[in-house]
Image (cartoon, grey):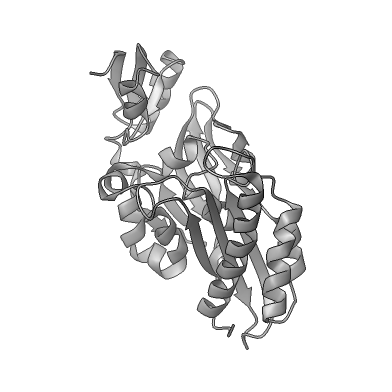
Amino acid sequence: MYDMKALYQAKSVADAVALRLAHPEAQIIAGGSDVLVQMREGKRAGVELISIYGLDELRGVTLEDDGTLCIGSLTSFSHITRDPLIQQHIPVLGEAVDQVGGPQIRNIGTIGGNTCNGVTSADSASTLFAYDAVIELTGPEGVRRVPIQEFYIRAGKVDIREGEIQTAIQISRESYERTFGHYIKYAMRNAMDIATLGTSVNVRLSPDGKTVERARVAFGVAGPVPLRAATAERLAEGKPVSEETAEAFAQAVKEDINPRDSWRAARDFRMHIAVESARRAFIEAVNRAGGAL
């Protein structure tokens, strides 16, 4: 059923790095929800695999002494959605990954696999971009941390170097404190579908809930890689919480996105969805933050 040359089982992170160096053409496999499907389709005939699925030290969500949230790369989508730290500090991430595939996929699929694929439609990606996530990689030279905006190089290509594996995703206290978000996935079906467009917005309001101190908006499928709409973010900063601000914020996203035509949707349609979803997600984020719109 699966045409593979060899399967190596890593016993530790250090062992995984050693196996990567010894077999540089091998494919890392965790949950296998993407790799095994591709193999069954014949796209990876004769591949070597390095399984890291047994590395329990890469599972779970922890809070470091400085308040940084650390999500192990092998943490499943289902685990993220239910995790108390995620629910307390970044519930929007749990809501986003709860829209990946169906229950079986969410039980086996991992946050690390979702980001390492490098695809712009990954449901986790826009929220991680909106929260300035940092990717932790471990390799022969030790630990390297890369801002997620730099991790995505081009469509399907991420910054993983020789011998490295992704070990964690980190989100700083500064990125999530007093911050509330909302994610909107637009797809042709309500379940088991790839996003036609994904939009994640988060806001931080003044104590009285009347002024936008900070806003972030990121998109999936609005370009070859996930991206932030910096023009809209700058426009909203310091503005009053109002319908006018929400509309201006939404219209401004057109300055930074560049969706393409595809069989799923035309470019103009994706532009329309981006504006409308940015407006709706902004309003919902403001309401969750204690504002009134």
Q: Is residue 97 visible?
A: yes
Q: Relative to 242, does residue 193 appear above or below in the rendering?
A: above
Instruction: Residue 46: name its quadrant.
Output: top left
Residue 38 spot, x, y in % from top left = 37, 25
Residue 121 lies left or right of residue 61; in this view the side is right
Residue in the image at 41% along x and 14% along y: 23
Q: Is residue 201 left or right of residue 116?
A: right
Say above or below: 288 vs 93.
below
Quadrant, the C terminus:
bottom right
Q: Residue furthest left?
A: 1
Between residue 133 and residue 281, name the one nearer to us.
281
Q: How many marks?
A: 0
Where's residue 74, x and y in %? Answer: 35, 42
User: Which residue appears at 53% of the width and 36% of the height?
Assistant: 118
Asked if residue 67 can be seen in this view, the reply is no
Q: Quadrant of the N terminus?
A: top left
Q: In the rendering, at what x and y percent does residue 178 appear? A: 55, 74
Residue found at x 53% / y 67%: 181
Q: Which quadrant would residue 258 be assigned to in this image? A: top right
161 vs 83: above or below: above
Q: Residue at x 55, y 59 (%)?
A: 200
User: Farthest residue toward the bottom?
Assistant: 208
Tell which of 113 and 250 is nearer to you.
Answer: 250
- Left-right relation of 135 to 149: left
Position of 56 relative to 87 (above/below): above
Left or right, 8 with reference to 138: left
